[in-house]
Amino acid sequence: MRPVLRRLLAIPPLVLAVATLAFFLMRAAPGGPFDRERAPASPQIEAALKARYHLDEPLWKQYARFLGGLCRADLGPSFKYRHHSVGDILAQTLPVSLALGSLAFGFAVGTGIPIGFLAAVHRGRWPDWLASFLVLVGVCIPTFVLAPLLVLWFGLGLGWFPVALWGSLPQAVLPTVALGLYFAARISRLVREGVADTLRAPFIVAARAKGLDEFTLLRRHALRPALLPVVSFAGPMLADLLTGSFVVEKVFQLPGTGAFFVNAFFSRDYPMMLGLVILYSALLLVLNLAADLAYRWIDPRVRHV
Amino acid sequence: MSERQTPSRAAWKRFRGNRRAVLATVVLAFAVVAVAAGPWISGQAANAGTDLPFAAPGPGHWFGTDIHGRDLLARVLAGTRISLLVGLVGAGVSVVIGVVWGMGSAYVGGRIDGIMMRCVDVLYALPNIVFVMLAITMLEEHAVRWLGIHAAGLAPAARELLLFACLGAVSWLNMARVVRGQVLVLKECPFVLASRALGASPVQILRRHVLPNIAGIVVVCAALTLPSVILYESFLSFLGLGIRPPDASLGTLIEDGARQLNPLRVRWWLLLGPGGVLATVLLAFQWLGDGLRDALDPRSNPES
């Protein structure tokens, strides 16, 4: 367990490095949060605002202030939504994104693995072609097209599901599909290739020759090694899903975190951006570690390297 | 049996035997020719409006027209050109950075390797979208302003090239990791040790012995990066950071079509033309990548 502990301990410095990089990159970007074009105000008011948020201090002092806030787990006030702290905003919006992201993850894994598996087992026959078509659709249609199409067909045309807002299970169906379809397609492709590769391996021939029944063979011997690429894909994917999606949240009017990634950048809301960067990077690193642990659990060969 | 079976010849044979890969190559070659001959095929300029908005496909406008009466076939051809350029430049940039970084890191090794790979980790953990947006606005501010002073005519083209390069600059991380893993193995191989013992310089070794051996995996990796760069560009255009109107990429054309979606009047051709071409191009790249991977992997079985 030593290497795991070491990697766990490496996460906070890495997150700090990412936050530092983001901090200085953001300040180097042109424009500021209280520029004339964003918040028209007299020069006096602009100066007062800058003083209020310490933007008139030298950069190193602002950075030190940011680090100090980080130590107290305080991400500071949002520049855009002036009466809310970044922590408050995240606390309000993150649950929505976490819930939607988990649902989309479940959808992606729950449909991607069986479809890819069936495609590999029936290679070159109609389930394979059907799966290839689904993958193509899932990968090629950008989310910002898929989401309105879903609303149009299943929301307005057929009237099966509500088209916006958040709170009940039917309301979650369309956003879940819109968010998860791309990942379902990618997963099913990985599984199909993995299973098809494994089925050619000598140990499968050996197992078949020994008379193992086909179901056990496929489930126990072929599927398990094929899941390895999925596991390493799933770590970063889950981090993306859980921190929300700009497009899906915009189309379905969901109060999630994803919209802030883009909006905070456009309004140069420095503390909000940094909060999101820290959240995302920490989540990504933890999930990658989790994926590696799952990898070890599935593939005993990795354990002793 | 007189023909010598070199690895590259064997790979070419495997590639030719792969029907999907050959088909994909033909489709992509056709796309390149069509894009180059764009105005002659459609007979219209991509940005020239007519007084026929939303004409359904038919003779004269094979793909129909859009909201401003512009011929959609001409726009799809122009958009395909931009999308292919985005993909090629983006993937090219990611190959250059990724290969140099990964190869250098692995070959030098030791502490430098550790530092270089930590850099990759840090960039990897930075949300992609934040990185791209920052890179684009910063470079735009400095480079395009500089060009505006010194060569005003080039500024719009430079902006697009910059965008393509930025997309490549965020997608090299995987490439660097893959290349590093390969080079770590290769540099302990007997033939590398032998040429080092013979006094070859590191640059010579990397160029003559390491690079040819990682070419396969790099090509495959690039073929897989390409579609993701094309898709990413469409997302950036959706945010208003990508291609600017009246220019169009396949992504922005699809988005324009999606904007006209409503339950009352169905204008399917606005989505079908650009969407169909995008799907075809992406599928072709995927098959090409698969074909290259199978062809360049000597263990692969040509029967399958």
Image: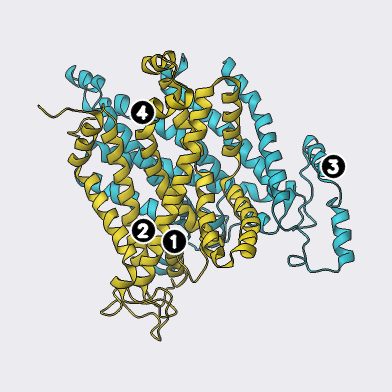
Q: Which residue is mark 2?
A: B278
Q: Residue at x 26, y 35 (%)?
A: B295
Q: Which residue is mark 4?
A: B213
Q: Residue at x 85, y 50 (%)?
A: A54
Q: Which mark is residue A222?
A: none
Q: Residue at x 30, y 63 (%)?
A: B34
Q: Are marks 3 and 1 on the same chain?
A: no
Q: Amino acid at mark 3?
A: Lys
Q: Are marks 2 and 3 on the same chain?
A: no
Q: Splitting the image into 4 quarters, where does residue B127 fall?
A: top right
Mark 4 or mark 3: which is in front?
4
Is tag 1's residue or tag 2's residue first in the polypeptide sequence? 1
Does dot 4 land on a helix, a strand or a loop?
helix
Q: Amino acid at mark 1?
A: Gly
Does dot 1 land on a helix, a strand or a loop?
helix
Does dot 3 land on a helix, a strand or a loop?
helix
* Mark-to-mark CA distance, 4 and 3: 50 Å
Q: Any idea which chain is the yellow one in this picture?
A: B
Q: Any idea which chain is the cyan one in this picture?
A: A
Q: Amino acid at mark 4?
A: Asn
